[in-house]
């Protein structure tokens, strides 16, 4: 369990002591001046955490929390390349922290020691930043400069790895997390782009007396065969009735021949059409025609897994698969509330500084949510994040005055009071509720774990000018 003392010591060490050291190592601070590395980093991180659209005039007021007097024109001069290097090193240091809450009381997930979800997102940047973060320039709709964020999230305990940054052209299959082991007894849920036969092989091998599990959607074109070695044609074994599901044992891959359960589920027509629309849009963005096989198979959820039936039934496997969407909600929270892909400036180094500082802010926000309400399976990430943003100034003041722990405890109390359970309404949410408390789920259930609805009226008024927008899809 995350202790408040552990959390406050981590924040104090990194954002005070190490921030000042890193500022000198990167050349951002060459001599003692009226603003230190800690002053600069905390003003940006907590300023943009509280208000992602704050201007430099607002930053001058935020800096006063640390008794730093600087004008907005003075701030404009604080974004050289050395500031980028400083904030990048600071973000890297924050991503190295391991904070993990106790497992949330979600019956299906607690059958595993960890439930790891992995995904990535890209942020389109101005072309002049192509030397720093190279994109996929040349294809339709692609930017010459692009930053990719890789994240691994244990949704059982809330522990977050990343975001690790790579150039936008970096393939998901070459994730910087590839060398990291899934914990013994853990379950790996990856997006289609992270499917690889070597990963299935590694997760299927028992090491040190322990086994790891996987549950992943099958990419179109993957070779399947039965135990006798005869190739299987999916079209001949797919269930045709809407909502029907079935499974059989297969070998995955022509050479690898990894033993697995093949799970097939016919999805509703509206879901299939949404998938086909997305396939066509992605194909158009890359300048080619969509595969007819991919369009046809969009009508089914096709999954391979090495989880034994005694641990997860067919129905339960389809329910647990929906947990992968929690990372989509996390990225959406960072995008819509943290505005990690938006900026006001046209100056390239200031843009990069803003992205790094906002990512650091999202990571700190996540730590507070872990400590504050992770034990509530019906918590609202959106509401919890609203508390963090509203109280962000207290973190900065607490660091400056030396009473951070008291401020953190107050924030966590506010979070627990506001992050009350959202009662289920429709049929899908009622099934989610059943799954979270341990009832036997049915096909079509989705675990509504860590979700939260955005209150109406929470978007910016149309009269407010929007800042420059990047390209986080």
Image (cartoon, rainbow, N blue to C red):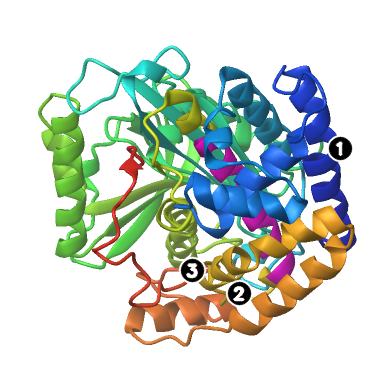
Q: Secondary structure at mark 2?
A: loop
Q: Earlier in the sequence, mark 3 or mark 1?
A: 1
Q: Nearer the viewer, residue 186 or 354?
A: 354
| Location of residue 273 by image quarter | bottom left
Tell me whether the residue at label 3 lies in contact with that at label 1, contact meaning CB atoms closer than 8 angstroms: no
325 relative position to 37: left or right? left
Q: Nearer the viewer, mark 2 or mark 3?
A: 3
- Residue 139 is covered by the magenta coloring: no
| Location of residue 397 by image quarter | bottom right
Marks 3 and 1, Cα distance to the nearest angstrom? 35 Å
| Location of residue 171 by image quarter | top left
351 relative position to 6: left or right? left
Residue that appears at 77% across and 18% down: 30
| Residue ID for mark 1 | 17
| Residue ID for mark 2 | 377
Q: Pinpoint residue 99: horizontal percent, then vertical percent.
A: 77, 51
User: What type of secondary structure mainly makes up the magenta span?
Assistant: helix
Q: Nearer the viewer, mark 2 or mark 1?
A: 1
Vertical placement of residue 289 versus 162, above or below: above
- Residue range (magenta): 354-372
Q: Earlier in the sequence, mark 2 or mark 3?
A: 2
Q: Nearer the viewer, residue 263 or 421?
A: 421
Q: Pinpoint residue 418: horizontal percent, then vertical percent.
A: 60, 82
Residue that appears at 69% across and 53% down: 64
Q: Earlier in the sequence, mark 2 or mark 1?
A: 1
Residue that appears at 19% across and 26% down: 286
Residue 270: assigned label:
none
Q: Residues within 10 Å of mark 3 (few under 14, many from 20)?
A: some
Q: Secondary structure at mark 3?
A: loop
Q: Residues within 10 Å of mark 2 (few under 14, many from 20)?
A: many
| Residue ID for mark 3 | 451
Marks 2 and 1, Cα distance to the nearest angstrom? 36 Å
């Amino acid at each position: 369990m995350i202790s408040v003392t552990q959390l406050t010591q981590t924040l104090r060490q990194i954002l005070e002591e190490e921030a000042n050291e890193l500022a000198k190592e990167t050349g951002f601070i060459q001599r003692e001046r009226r603003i230190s590395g800690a002053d600069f980093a905390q003003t940006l991180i907590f300023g943009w955490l509280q208000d992602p659209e704050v201007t430099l005039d607002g930053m001058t007021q935020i800096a006063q929390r640390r008794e730093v007097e600087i004008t907005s024109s003075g701030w404009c001069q604080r974004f050289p390349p050395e500031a980028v290097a400083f904030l990048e090193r600071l973000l890297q240091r924050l991503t190295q922290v391991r904070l993990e809450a106790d497992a949330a009381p979600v019956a299906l997930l607690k059958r595993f020691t960890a439930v790891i979800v992995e995904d990535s997102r890209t942020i389109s940047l101005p072309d002049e930043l192509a030397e720093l973060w190279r994109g996929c320039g040349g294809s339709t709709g692609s930017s010459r400069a692009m930053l990719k964020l890789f994240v691994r999230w244990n949704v059982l305990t809330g522990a977050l790895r990343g975001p690790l940054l790579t150039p936008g052209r970096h393939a998901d299959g070459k994730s910087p997390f590839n060398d990291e082991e899934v914990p013994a007894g853990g379950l790996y849920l990856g997006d289609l782009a992270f499917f690889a036969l070597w990963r299935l092989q590694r997760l299927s091998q028992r090491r040190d007396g322990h086994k790891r599990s996987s549950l992943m959607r099958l990419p179109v074109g993957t070779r399947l065969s039965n135990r006798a070695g005869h190739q299987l044609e999916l079209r001949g074994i797919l269930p045709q009735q809407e909502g029907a599901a079935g499974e059989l044992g297969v070998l995955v891959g022509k050479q690898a021949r990894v033993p697995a359960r093949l799970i097939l589920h016919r999805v509703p027509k509206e879901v299939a059409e949404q998938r086909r629309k997305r396939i066509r849009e992605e194909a158009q963005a890359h300048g080619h025609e969509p595969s007819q096989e991919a369009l046809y198979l969009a009508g089914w959820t096709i999954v391979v897994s090495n989880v034994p039936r005694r641990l997860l039934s067919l129905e339960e496997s389809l329910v647990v698969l929906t947990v992968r969407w929690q990372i989509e909600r996390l990225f959406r929270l960072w995008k819509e509330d943290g505005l990690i892909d938006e900026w006001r400036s046209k100056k390239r180094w200031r843009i990069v500084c803003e992205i790094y500082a906002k990512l650091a802010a999202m990571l700190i926000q996540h730590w507070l949510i872990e400590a504050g309400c992770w034990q509530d399976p019906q918590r609202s990430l959106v509401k919890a994040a609203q508390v963090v943003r509203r109280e962000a100034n207290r973190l900065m003041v607490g660091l400056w005055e030396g009473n951070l722990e008291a401020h953190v405890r107050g924030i966590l109390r506010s979070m627990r009071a506001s992050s009350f359970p959202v009662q289920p309404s429709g049929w899908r949410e009622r099934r989610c509720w059943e799954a979270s408390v341990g009832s036997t789920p049915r096909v079509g259930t989705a675990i509504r774990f860590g979700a939260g609805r955005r209150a109406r009226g929470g978007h910016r008024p149309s009269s407010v000018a929007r800042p420059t927008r990047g390209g986080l899809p």
